[in-house]
């Protein structure tokens, strides 16, 4: 079993609804997405060509890679549109007193 750590990465004020920011947690680049007032965390790397998902547009519950238009469900990491077929890693998020933390595997 892989051990995890919870890393504080942002405040809720830094992430308005419908927006994405990129943060670092345990040597991983994470795209934090605010969809419907809830915060979701996925890897900031498209599984199609390693594009920067955090630079993409949040369209509903999907984020679109700016390179080739692949989309991923930010709530699960599932690939939802070609050319991507493999999911991105999704991470548990905790929001306590305005602080946003992400649970990631320990390096």
Image: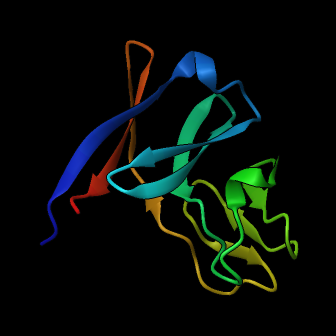
**Residue 6 versus residue 14 in the image, above or below:** below
Question: Can you say whether 85 is above or below 43 in the image?
Answer: below
Query: Where residue 49 sits: x, y (%)?
Result: 71, 82
For the N terminus, give its image quadrant.
Answer: bottom left
Residue 75, position in %: x, y? 58, 54
98 left or right, relative to 31: left
Task: Give the quadrant of residue 87.
Answer: bottom right
**Color scheme of the displayed model:** rainbow
Residue lying farthest top? 97
Task: Please count the marks in the image.
Answer: 0
> Is residue 106 left or right of 81 when viewed as pictured?
left
Viewer-proximal residue among 93 and 51 = 51
Quadrant in the rendering for residue 107: bottom left
Q: Residue at x 42, y 58 (%)?
A: 28
Q: Name the residue rendered at 61%, 22% in the picture.
A: 14
Answer with the quarter of the image where residue 3 lies.
bottom left
For residue 99, above or below residue 18: above
Residue at 87% from the left image edge and 71% from the top image edge: 69
Could you say where residue 10 lies in the image, as x and y percent from the top left? 48, 28
Q: Can you give x and y, in whole percent of width and height, for residue 57 in the image?
A: 83, 51
Please indicate whether residue 74 sits to the left or right of residue 27 in the image. Answer: right
Instruction: Name the one closer to the observer, 8 or 95.
Output: 8
């Amino acid at each position: 079993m892989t051990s995890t750590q919870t890393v504080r990465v942002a405040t809720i004020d830094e992430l308005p609804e419908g927006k994405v920011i990129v943060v670092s947690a345990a040597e991983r680049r994470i795209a934090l997405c605010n969809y419907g007032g809830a915060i979701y965390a996925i890897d900031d790397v498209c599984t199609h060509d390693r594009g920067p998902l955090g630079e993409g547009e949040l369209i509903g519950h999907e984020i679109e890679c700016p390179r080739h238009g692949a989309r991923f469900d930010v709530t699960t990491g599932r690939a939802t549109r070609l050319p991507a077929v493999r999911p991105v890693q999704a991470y548990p998020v905790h929001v306590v007193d305005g602080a946003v933390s992400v649970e990631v595997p320990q390096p």
